[in-house]
Every structure is written in C-alpha cells, then in structure tokens.
Image: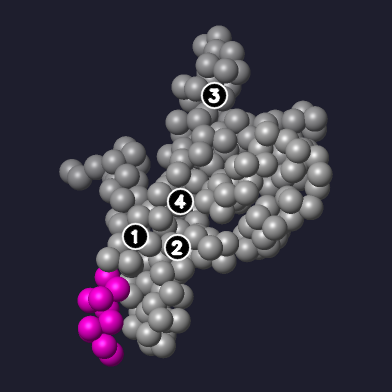
Amino acid sequence: MSFEIIAATFPLYLKGLWTTVWLTATALLIGLVLSVPLAIARASKNPLLSKPVWAYTYFFRGTPLFVQLLLIYYGSGQFPLIRESIFWPLLQQAWFCAMLAFVLNTAAYTTEILRGAIESTPHGEVEAARACGMGDGLMYRRIVLPQALRRALPAYGNECVFMLHGSAVASTVTLLDLTGVANIVNSRYYSPYEAYSMAALFYMALTFAIVAGFILLERRMLRHLRPRSA
C-alpha cells in the first residue's frame, strides 16, 4: 500500500467528501420535509389522496436509484417540452439531476416509514384527542406526528445510511464525490486498492457519525420509554 499516493491525493478526497456530504444532507433534508405531507396523504382513507402517493412511492422504491438518476440526467433531454421549459438550464446541471433523483428517492422511502409510524399510533390516543375537541390538523400537529417521528427514528436512521451509500452513483454523472475522486485516483495512479480503500474509509466514518448521531437522538427522544431505576 502506497502512502505516498494517499498523501498526494488526500486534498482531492476532502473535496469529494464535501460533495458527498452536502448532496446527501441536502437531499435528506428536502426529502424529509416533502415526506411529512405525503405520509399524511398516504395514510389517508381517501383514495384520491392515498393512491397517487402510493404510485409515487411504489415506483421510486421499486426501481434502482442508479436507473432513476440516468432517466433524469440523460432521459429528460429527449422531450422537447422539457428542453423548452424554464427548468432545462437546471436539468443540464449534473448536480441538480443528482439532487433531484436523491430527493425523489429518499422522500419515497421516508414517506412509507412515516406512514407506518402514523398508522401505528394507538387508537386510544386518537380518540382521546377527538374527545378533547381537537380537529384533524391540531391532532396531527400535537399527537400523531410527534409520536410518529419518534417511532420512525430507527428506520429513518437506516434510510440516512442507505442514502449516503446510494449517493455514490453521483460519480456516474461526472460529479466528483468520494467515489468519483476514487475513480480519478485509480485512473491516474493505477492503484485501485489505495484509491477505493480511502473512499471506503471516508464512507465508514460518515456512516459511524450518522449512526452515533441517531443513537444520541433516540436516547433523548425515547427516554420516556426507558424503565426507571428504583
């Protein structure tokens, strides 16, 4: 293993680390914001609300993220309506296509995570809220959503890790994330072990940070469920 190659290319990996972090973090944040109203609609008994959201989540959960990115990056330019729209300058940018694919993908998974958490809200709590005169909006804001977000934490932590690992496909559309930098280092020095081992170490460090962060968050938000010491 050549530490000279690692030392010479370390600044490149730091740039790739920044690209990976901001792409993943921004996609997760936007996806979480979008998933809350989508999860409420998905859990609705009204088929006009739930069925379109079901179709959306089914497509993005049923197809690979890599294929979704290729459809957006390469496929959108096939349609004259898109090329003549105001969105075409953005769709020509690799970072925007990657961000759009990541947001749509993680929002679909997070929607189903939150939908399951919403539907598992104890019926007695819902009835108690209605007995207190709460409307649907107030009940969701004070009872259902806070409880659902707490229950969804472990599953959502896994989704954040999966999104981090899935972000490696951004390198296929010319973005220099960690995997993209590793590809460049390998092609420049013909040292795949050094190139991809460094990328793997950075991904492992980011995964550890996410897992540790969610463990602390779960301890804080779920501490009321822990048995009290005598």
Q: Which quadrant: the C terminus?
A: top left
Give the spatial CA distance, label 4 vs label 1.
Answer: 12 Å
Amino acid at circle 1: Lys
Q: Earlier in the sequence, mark 2 or mark 3?
A: 3
How dense is the environment of label 2, judged by Cα within 10 Å: few (below 14), some, or many (20 and up)?
Answer: many
Quarter of the image for residue 111 reads top right
How dense is the environment of label 4, judged by Cα within 10 Å: few (below 14), some, or many (20 and up)?
Answer: many
Amino acid at circle 2: Leu
Q: The residue tagged with tag 4: helix, strand or loop?
A: helix
Say if 69 sits above or below 138 in the image. below
| Disc number lying in front (3 or 4) | 4
Residues marked 2 and 4 touching at CB (< 8 Å):
no
- Identify which residue, 216 or 175, lies in the foreground: 175
Please provide the residue range marked out in magenta.
1-10
Name the outermost residue toward the top: 133
| Disc number lying in front (4 or 1) | 1
How dense is the environment of label 1, judged by Cα within 10 Å: few (below 14), some, or many (20 and up)?
Answer: some
Give the spatial CA distance, label 2 vs label 3.
Answer: 41 Å
Quarter of the image for residue 20 reads bottom left
Amino acid at circle 3: Tyr
User: Badge 4 is on which residue?
Assistant: 23
Q: Which quadrant: the N terminus?
A: bottom left
Say if 39 sits above or below 192 in the image. above
